[in-house]
Image (cartoon, rainbow, N blue to C red):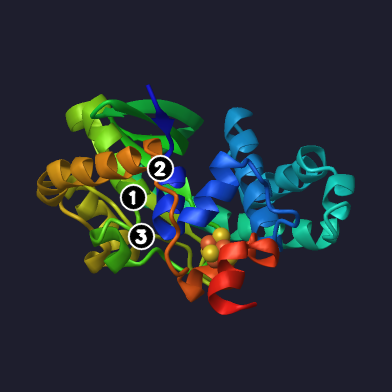
Amino acid sequence: MHHFSPTALETYQSCVQKYVYRYEDELYPPNRSEQAQVGHLFHKVMETLLKEKISLVDSKHTLMHAKQLMPELKPPDSLSSQGLDPFFIYQLTTDLISQQIQLEQSWVETTSVSPGIAEAKGTISVGPYKLELRLDRIDRIGDQFVFIDYKTQETPPSWKALYEYELLQPWIYSLYGLETYGADFLGFVYFLPKKPLIRPVLAFSENFHQSMLSFQKIKKKFIEPAQVHDHIAPLKKHITALMDRIKAKDFLCPEPPKSHCRTCSYKPFCHVLLDHHGS
Ligand code: SF4
């Protein structure tokens, strides 16, 4: 049986060549961007804080622990070897964590949420395939569960991309939530940094909708549960078709979207980019 991840499928959709570099050739970008480094470190710090049951809402205490963890989780040497200034990375990550603490405080006040489970894993079957999921965090509100995913860039995922299935992660996690937890699955939320406000942007549940509305007043960013159910069949068809293509090694790469190439880590040596755009 073939195993896939939501990220792999999104990568294949965004650029076939990028998928080939990353998942077939197992080529890791030579220089991970600062943003990627900060994202990685941020996730590691949040995971460790949760696992060590450090309060996420006590600003002084949480930040102090986070700062102590950073050198341990990402030794400066390994950052330096990639040409990045570790202290710059620490500074950016500290800034993100400060924002996250504000979010955690609002989150607890608004939802009476219990501390989360960090880095949960799961699998979901779609047709003859299995999708492997890695959830940043699962929170509990009463007897129900909310899936959390941290996004460390400031741009919220596009709503259009979600409805056109370019963005698959929220759908796949919600499918998993519905299949695994049934009525106890309350919603899926992205936590995004956005100075001076951090915003969760997506949720899939009516009850959750009510509580989240007062939290961030972003009504248009919610999908009602009935809509999720309407999407299950077409979504599974879409995902299965993608996995069929990957399994059949359909790796013909059309002209790459320039917007994707601009920020792509494989740009320095990508032959597809060179063939199409000559740079
Ligand atoms: S540089 Fe462009 S074409 Fe090449 S892998 Fe990246 S996104 Fe794809």
What amino acid is labelled 2 in the image?
Pro
What amino acid is labelled 1 in the image?
Leu
Kindly identify which residue carries mark 2.
Answer: 6
Compared with 240, 76 (above or below) is: below
Is there a contact, CB below 8 Å, between mark 1 and mark 2? yes
Q: Which residue is rendered at x = 43% and y = 51% of the image?
A: 12
Percent position of residue 261, x then y:
55, 69
Percent position of residue 139, x then y:
40, 36
Camera-side residue of 24 and 31: 24
Q: How much space separates mark 1 and mark 2, taking CA atoms?
A: 6 Å
Camera-side residue of 81 and 118: 81
Q: Quick one: SS at disc 3?
A: loop
Q: How many marks?
A: 3
Q: How much space separates mark 3 and mark 2, taking CA atoms?
A: 19 Å
| Quarter of the view holding residue 43 | top right
> Can the viewer see residue 128?
yes
Percent position of residue 278, x then y:
62, 78
Q: Quick one: SS at disc 2?
A: helix
Tell me the tag on residue 201: 3
Residue at the far top in the pictured view: 1
Of the numbered discs 1 and 2, the one sitting upstream in the chain is: 2
Compared with 217, 277 (above or below) is: below
Percent position of residue 69, x then y:
76, 40
Is there a contact, CB below 8 Å, between mark 3 and mark 1? no
What amino acid is labelled 3 in the image?
Val
Tell me the tag on residue 168: 1
Q: Quadrant of ligand 1?
A: bottom right
- Label 1 environment density (alpha carbons within 10 Å; few <14, some 14–19, many ≥20): many
| Quarter of the view holding residue 89 | bottom right
Camera-side residue of 111 and 188: 188
